Image: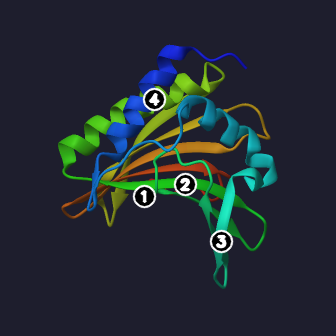
Amino acid sequence: MTTNRRPMLALSASLALLSGCSSFGPVTSGTDNPCATLQAIVKDYSTGFERYRGSGSSYSMVTLYRAKEQLIKGHCEIWEWGNGDAAYTCTVGAPNQPVAEARFNEASNLLAQCLGPDWTRETKPRERDGKPAGEAVALQTNDPTAPSVSLHRVEDGSRQSLYLFVGPSSRSPSDK
């Protein structure tokens, strides 16, 4: 698949911005070509992301694998549930709401560009206990074998985080 170099470079910059500062300092994308990596991760969904699984830790209902390809270096995992469902996820904090909102807007636009015109997106507010709790964008395609892709800006009190999800729509984080 041919990729437009501009969205790839923009996604690289966006993922670096999205990752921003953690409690241990700045973090970056763990791949030279995040757009191509995202496309490959989406394509590997049907295998449960087997190609991307690193070392794992098993718990009673889920096994967590460190992702071999890190869209956000040091912040990505593959979750596999007992029924065989699997999801590729990345989670990272943001220092405050304005920064989280800016990163969310830029990253959601660039995710849509990387996935291409066959994917549609819908942005909705998130709620917790009837109160605003951020926002989410869901990207979907008519291909029944493709995963759900979503990006969430999660507010929890004064804490802000961004969460990327690639996996079954039945496991996609709720907007509520």
Instruction: Tell me how far mark 1 sits from mark 2, CA to CA.
Output: 18 Å
Determine which residue is flagged by label 3. 56
The answer to whether the residue labelled 3 contacts the one labelled 1, judged by CB atoms less than 8 Å apart, is no
Q: Residues within 10 Å of mark 2 (few under 14, many from 20)?
A: many
Determine which residue is flagged by label 2. 89
Tag 3's secondary structure?
A: strand
Tag 4's secondary structure?
A: helix
Of badges 4 and 2, nearer the viewer stands 4
Indicate which disc, 4 or 1, sits on the residue closer to the N terminus: 4
Instruction: Tell me how far mark 4 sits from mark 2, CA to CA.
Output: 16 Å
Of badges 2 and 3, nearer the viewer stands 3
Q: Residue at x 45, y 29 (%)?
A: 11
Indicate which disc, 4 or 2, sits on the residue closer to the N terminus: 4
Determine which residue is flagged by label 4. 11
Indicate which disc, 3 or 1, sits on the residue closer to the N terminus: 3
Q: Residues within 10 Å of mark 4 (few under 14, many from 20)?
A: many
The answer to whether the residue labelled 4 contacts the one labelled 2, judged by CB atoms less than 8 Å apart, is no
Numbered-mark total: 4
Q: Residues within 10 Å of mark 1 (few under 14, many from 20)?
A: some
Instruction: Tell me how far mark 4 sits from mark 1, CA to CA.
Output: 27 Å
Of badges 3 and 1, nearer the viewer stands 3
Indicate which disc, 1 or 2, sits on the residue closer to the N terminus: 2
Looking at the picture, which amino acid does disc 2 mark? Answer: Thr
Q: Residues within 10 Å of mark 3 (few under 14, many from 20)?
A: some
Q: Position of residue 100 (x, y in %)?
A: 27, 45
Q: Residue at x 46, y 56 (%)?
A: 74
The quarter of the picture where the C terminus appears is bottom left
Which label sits on residue 100?
A: none
Q: Residue at x 81, y 52 (%)?
A: 47
Instruction: Tell me how far mark 3 sits from mark 4, CA to CA.
Output: 28 Å
Determine which residue is flagged by label 1. 176
